[in-house]
Amino acid sequence: MFLARSTPPPFDHRLPRAAAWLLALAVTACGGDAGREDEAPAWAIVHQGLPGALLSVWGTAADDVWTVGGDTRDGRGPLVLRYDGAAWTRLETGEASGDLWWVYGFAGGPVYVGGTGGVILRYEGGRFTKMPTPGTGTVFGLWGAQPDAMWAVGGEAGAAGFVWRLQGGAWVPEPSLPADVAASTAIWKVAGRGPDDVRFVGENGQAFGWDGAALAPRTTGVSTSLFTVHASAERFAAVGGQVSGVVLEDEGDGWRVAFDGADQGLTGVCLGEGETGWAVGLYGAVYARDADGWRAEETGLRFRADLHAVWVDPDGGVWAVGGKTISPPLTDGILIHRGETVEGGGI
């Protein structure tokens, strides 16, 4: 899932340092208190310059966080990191090479990761097991309502796409995916609110819904790639765009454009509780959602990296990952976090 870049913005498209200082001074003059309890949580860089880009982040709690990514080219294969609330550990997958594009699982296990070559690994009992799959296309997305009822999607840009289901412990192609789509359109991501309410997004604005019986096309009104979809109790959200970014939402009455003001393409989205949500993209772009809609988020961080995925933990902490993600080799992994302090290092 490689994107075309637009002309990059200046090194830091956030507030210049002088402007930020003047703004802080104005706030202080108006009676602001830097230590007040209602001050927004701070962003911080947890990891930077890792040997593999980080492409997906997910977890079950603030002290059980997983992130996966690119081949580290050191003979140890793709980068897989797990955080237990105190330290980070690199997990060995048993794969000598290849990139991992997505991670999804369940409290207490299992955890599934997918990537290049049709690879799907299942982690349980402290070890990874490689699962047989029906193809060799890249697995870009994974989601499931239950450990034994998973979906995997992917393909190759402009060439072929697939939707697989885990049934009876085996991955099998979903026959209701239209043949013309399977022949020419990658399916990038999948997410749902239950076993009979699942959404899929892909190239050229393609989208499908699953009602428990078959995949049905869903009109999005856009022609750009939709790279990620996520669900909350209130809505689905999908993001995409290669030159400029777009956010689509569906609250049960079909997809609509909720925001098209992102200067750069968006690749990751995660909805939180109620009206909240987060989206990330090229050149470190971060956007936040509240009751008033989507807006640019000023992280105050300075780094040269794209953000590829974002996850919100049950405590409201925000985790975003990326690196050099546009074309291989996928390197220079970065993880940023908003919320309580998270220690880096120890890998």
Image (tube, rainbow, N blue to C red):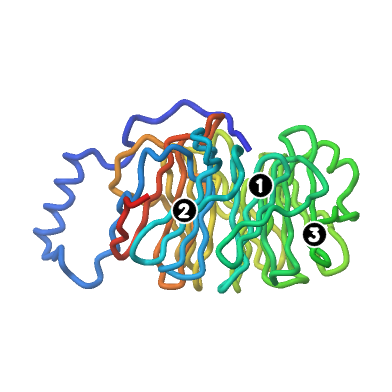
Q: In which quarter of the image is residue 31?
A: bottom left
Rendered location of residue 163, percent (x, y): 79, 52
User: Where on the picture, by quarter, is residue 245?
Assistant: top right
Residue at disc 1, secondary structure: strand
Residue type at mark 3: give it.
Arg
Residue at screen point 59% across, 33% down: 3
Q: What is the number of the mark on residue 335?
A: none
Residues 254 and 52: in front is: 52
Label 2 – label 1 distance at C-alpha = 18 Å
Q: Which residue lies furthest to the left in this view?
A: 29
- Please state if 133 lies on the left or on the right of 79 as rendered: right
Q: Marks 2 and 3, how far apart in space?
A: 26 Å
- x and y, in percent, of residue 261 in the image: 50, 45
Q: In this view, does 196 lie above or below 30?
A: below
Would residue 5 appear left or right of 316 to someone viewing this image?
right
Considering only order in the chain, which callout, 3 or 2, is on the residue closer to the N terminus? Answer: 2
Q: Is mark 2 on a helix, strand or loop?
A: strand
Front-most of residues 345 and 95: 95
> Please, what is the three-letter code of the amino acid marked with disc 1?
Phe
Q: What residue did someone put label 2 on? A: 81
Q: In this view, does 176 lie above or below 59?
A: above
Q: Can residue 58 be seen in this view?
A: yes
Q: Which of marks 2 and 1 is in front?
A: 2
Residue topped by disc 1:
140
Q: Nearer the viewer, mark 2 or mark 3?
A: 2
**Above/below status of 70 relative to 198:** above
Give the distance between the C-alpha atoms of the residues marked 3 and 1, in whole angstroms.
Answer: 14 Å
* Vertical order, 302 against 59 (above or below): above
**Residue 261 in view, yes or no:** no
Label 1 crowd bin: few (<14), some (14–19), many (20+), radius 10 Å: many
Question: In the rendering, at what x and y percent does residue 25 appear?
Answer: 11, 52
- The mark that comes first in sequence, 3 or 1, is 1
